[in-house]
Amino acid sequence: MRHYEIVFLVHPSQSEQVPAMLDRYRINLEARGGQIHRLEDWGRRQLAYPINKVHKAHYVLMNVECDAEALAELESAFRFNDAVLRNMIIKRDCAVTEPSPLLKSEDERDGSDEEGGGQRGERRPRRSDDSGEGRSAPREASAE
């Protein structure tokens, strides 16, 4: 069986239906001998460009191992589901199980909020002049 990475976008008005959709896709894959190695729900995010006059969508990432028949069934499920705006399926060489960079960055951001660090880094020390005064005195105009 081959490994695939699948990303699909769900219409934002159907976000509450995503868990049921994922269960349906998981059951369909496992019934045909497939396996899900990674499943990430990225939530509602801004689109780079509008799709059917929609500016946000619910993103889902899956890494699966399945045969061609199960993949074709999954593709047709995406195609005939009006809630799925777009999908992308990429063949991978091996199973990917570690969290995606997007999920890692969200976890780091959530951790920094708890510490009170926020999203901004620490401030750099103030630059001072060679004289050590900080600001130089205003120049006087020379009279000629």
Image (cartoon, rainbow, N blue to C red):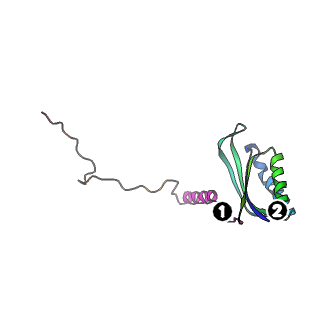
Q: Which mark is residue 49?
A: none
**x then y, percent, for residue 126:** 35, 53
Q: Find residue 20 and report its horizontal and vertical position in percent.
A: 81, 53
How many residues crowd mark 2 within 10 Å: few (<14), some (14–19), many (20+)?
A: some
- Does residue 103 appear left or right of residue 131 in this picture? right
Compared across the picture, whether 115 is left or right of 7 comes to left
How many numbered callouts? Answer: 2
Left or right of 41, for residue 131? left
* Quarter of the rendering occupied by the C terminus: top left
**Residue at 71% over, 36% down:** 53
The secondary structure type at the circle numbered 1 is loop
Q: State the CA–CA distance, disc 2 to disc 1.
A: 24 Å
| In the image, residue 105 lies in the stretch drawn in magenta | yes
Which range of residues does the magenta coloring cover? Answer: 95-117
- Given residues 2 and 65, the one toward you in this image is 2
Locate residue 140: give its quadrant: top left
**Amino acid type, residue under disc 2 in the picture:** Asp
Residue on which the image places disc 2? 67
Instruction: Identify the residue under disc 1.
Output: 99
